[in-house]
């Protein structure tokens, strides 16, 4: 059963049923009883004790006492907006996904941008990766593209994610520092898990201090699959390209803004939409044929590697426009639940071991964050197409299912929804052949930790290199433990000897032996000044 009527306004129309406008209304309790007075609790005498029977006071205070929910374990600080997506031309050759077929269809979307490390009240402009999560409310169900503004990730296997996050979150004994990679545990993790090298290079670059959410790229990071109507699959990586171009702050600006306007990025997004200056992002895909899986000098399942665009060009396939601010940050930005496993027919997974672990983590965390198994019924999370199954009950159930039957198969009553065939739009997993021994191992093809980190460094302009050196010096300079500092310097000597030397000189570590002779230099006057000032 498909809803042919999905268009850019479908989600807005659905949300309308849940919106509440109190203008001109009488104050009531949640039971609908009109309240006569809202400033004084009920007392025995005007100077006497408050009475337990004051049901309005009790209800009002109890609700207030329970207003907060846990913030997200990562990406706690975010901000969302509504919009729509349109494909430029039918993608039929590559995928059967309905929302990628008809250029006249506007699929509603909700996007949440976020920082990763800081708490919900932290500052927007800190040095960090940014989350870029998009929920497409398609006529075949919700598709979530849960990406970041950096095309690679710190680790290769999901089992290390809790360790990574524990290392960059505030240290448990004193909860410092808030929202920063400038501390011992993060750099200790980095130096002892050297697959982090590539993403750290991006994080120390200007990409980690974006000028605006409207001016960042987005990346699905993992390798996914497109599958077409004939069942033919291709590996795919997703990209968002901001129509305004990619722009960054300079670090000094970013640091000042964090104090002067911690809401800098959300304000910028909110105001541009209020002014009608709608943020736009083009969707791009890189595709690799199944038979070319092993044609590269990196493993295409390794999330610490990107696919160089000169080898695998990005094909621009559509555009997203964000044209409406949310009505209520809690109901929308906070309650939205993204999941990389929310896919529609025509989009499938790969065996990337980071992606595979994410497929477990998101629902698991949302079960506690959003209080039970029914958060798909929250207005922001509801698909715009019909949804029916035999999942019943649980905390905060909103749907009133009818009839005695809640199981499949049954012959008693025909309200047991029946599975759909592929032709009817049923999701059929791509039949990838899998075989192997059960092992706790990483393939040797994941062992190169430095080539792409080097490639990134070599692609930087002189100014960009200078900014990176300054960032390393600031962040690593905050590390107290001398061994950790030295390990970081030694680690980055595998990326570039000049870079390692510059970090060493800025943080009071030993210049690694092998690079003492380095003749490489940057001509920038600012950098040479910095060197004279800070050389040991
Ligand atoms: C949020 C886990 C890697 C992008 C989250 C959340 C968890 C999580 C538990 C909080 C979700 C919530 O409370 O609703 C993981 C695990 C990872 C991983 C276990 C690796 C194994 C990644 C990667 C990306 C990413 C590689 C980027 C491609 C995001 C984004 C959010 C998020 C954008 C915020 C979603 C929102 O705005 O609500 N992640 N993550 N994560 N993650 Fe991941």
Image (cartoon, rainbow, N blue to C red):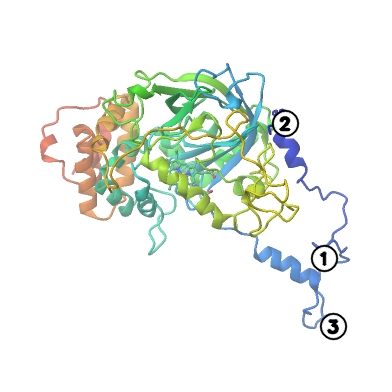
The residue depicted at 85 percent of the width and 59 percent of the height is 27
Relative depth, front residue between 230 and 382: 230
For mark 2, give the secondary structure. loop
Closer to us: 114 or 255: 114
Task: Tell me: 312 left or right of 534.
Answer: right
Q: Secondary structure at mark 3?
A: loop
Percent coordinates x, y for residue 413 in the rendering: 73, 49
Left or right, 300 with respect to 108, comes to left
Foreground disc of the pair 1, 2: 2
Contact flag, marks 1 and 2 (Cβ < 8 Å): no
Write the residue at 55% across / 58% down: 368
Q: Residue at x 77, y 82 (%)?
A: 49
Give how far across and how far down residue 2 sits, in percent.
68, 32
On residue 9, the disc is 2
Q: How far is mark 1 from mark 2, CA to CA? A: 38 Å
Q: Is residue 191 left or right of residue 336?
A: left
Q: Position of residue 444 (x, y in %)?
A: 23, 37
Q: CA distance from mark 3 to mark 2?
A: 55 Å
Q: Nearer the viewer, residue 350 or 391?
A: 391
SS at badge 1: loop
Dot label at residue 38 = 1
Quadrant where the image shows the N terminus: top right
What label does residue 45 carry, if any?
A: 3
Mark 1 or mark 3, which has the lower sequence index?
Answer: 1
Label 3 environment density (alpha carbons within 10 Å; few <14, some 14–19, many ≥20):
few
Disc 2 within 8 angstroms of ligand 1 (CB): no
């Amino acid at each position: 059963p498909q809803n042919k009527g999905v268009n850019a306004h479908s989600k807005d129309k659905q949300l309308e049923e849940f919106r509440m406008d109190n203008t001109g209304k009488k104050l009531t309790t949640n039971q609908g009883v009109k309240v006569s007075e809202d400033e004084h609790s009920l007392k025995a005498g005007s100077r006497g004790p408050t009475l337990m029977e004051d049901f309005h006071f009790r209800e009002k205070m109890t609700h207030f006492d329970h207003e907060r929910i846990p913030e997200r374990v990562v990406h706690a600080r975010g901000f969302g907006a509504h919009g729509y997506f349109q494909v430029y031309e039918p993608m039929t050759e590559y995928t059967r996904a309905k929302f990628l077929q008809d250029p006249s269809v506007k699929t509603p979307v909700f996007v949440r941008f976020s920082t990763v490390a800081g708490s919900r009240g932290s500052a927007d402009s800190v040095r960090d990766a940014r989350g870029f999560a998009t929920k497409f409310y398609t006529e075949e169900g919700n598709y979530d593209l849960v990406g970041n503004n950096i095309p690679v990730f710190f680790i290769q296997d999901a089992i290390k994610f809790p360790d990574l996050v524990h290392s960059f979150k505030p240290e448990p004994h004193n909860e410092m520092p808030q929202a920063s990679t400038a501390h011992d545990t993060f750099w200790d993790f980095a130096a002892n898990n050297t697959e982090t090298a590539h993403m750290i290079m991006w994080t120390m670059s200007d990409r980690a201090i974006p000028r605006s959410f409207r001016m960042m790229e987005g990346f699905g990071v993992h390798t996914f699959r497109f599958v077409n109507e004939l069942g033919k699959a291709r590996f795919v990586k997703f990209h968002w390209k901001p129509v305004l171009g990619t722009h960054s702050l300079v670090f000094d600006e970013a640091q000042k803004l964090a104090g002067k306007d911690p809401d800098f990025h959300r304000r910028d997004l909110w105001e541009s939409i209020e002014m009608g200056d709608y943020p736009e992002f083009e969707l791009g895909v890189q595709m690799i044929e199944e038979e070319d899986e092993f044609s590269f000098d990196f493993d295409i399942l390794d999330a610490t590697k990107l696919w160089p665009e000169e080898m695998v060009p990005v094909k621009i396939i559509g555009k997203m426009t964000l044209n409406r601010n949310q009505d209520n940050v809690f109901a929308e930005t906070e309650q939205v639940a993204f999941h990389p496993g929310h896919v529609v027919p025509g989009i499938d997974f790969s065996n990337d071991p980071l992606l595979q672990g994410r497929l477990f983590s998101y629902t698991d965390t949302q079960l506690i964050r959003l209080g039970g198994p029914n958060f798909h019924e929250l207005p922001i999370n509801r698909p715009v197409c019909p949804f029916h199954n035999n999942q019943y009950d649980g905390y905060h159930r909103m749907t009133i299912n009818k009839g005695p039957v809640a199981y499949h198969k049954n012959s008693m009553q025909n309200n047991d929804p029946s599975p759909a065939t592929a032709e009817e739009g049923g999701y059929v997993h791509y039949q990838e052949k899998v075989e192997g021994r059960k092992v706790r191992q990483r393939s040797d093809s994941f062992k190169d930790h430095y080539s792409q980190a080097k490639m990134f460094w070599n692609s930087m302009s002189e100014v960009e290199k200078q900014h990176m050196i300054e960032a390393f010096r600031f962040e690593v300079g905050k590390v107290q433990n001398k061994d950790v500092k030295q390990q970081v310097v030694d680690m980055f000597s595998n990326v570039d000897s000049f870079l390692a030397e510059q970090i060493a000189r800025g943080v009071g570590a030993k210049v690694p032996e092998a690079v003492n002779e380095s003749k490489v230099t940057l001509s920038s006057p600012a950098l040479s000044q910095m060197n004279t000032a800070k050389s040991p």
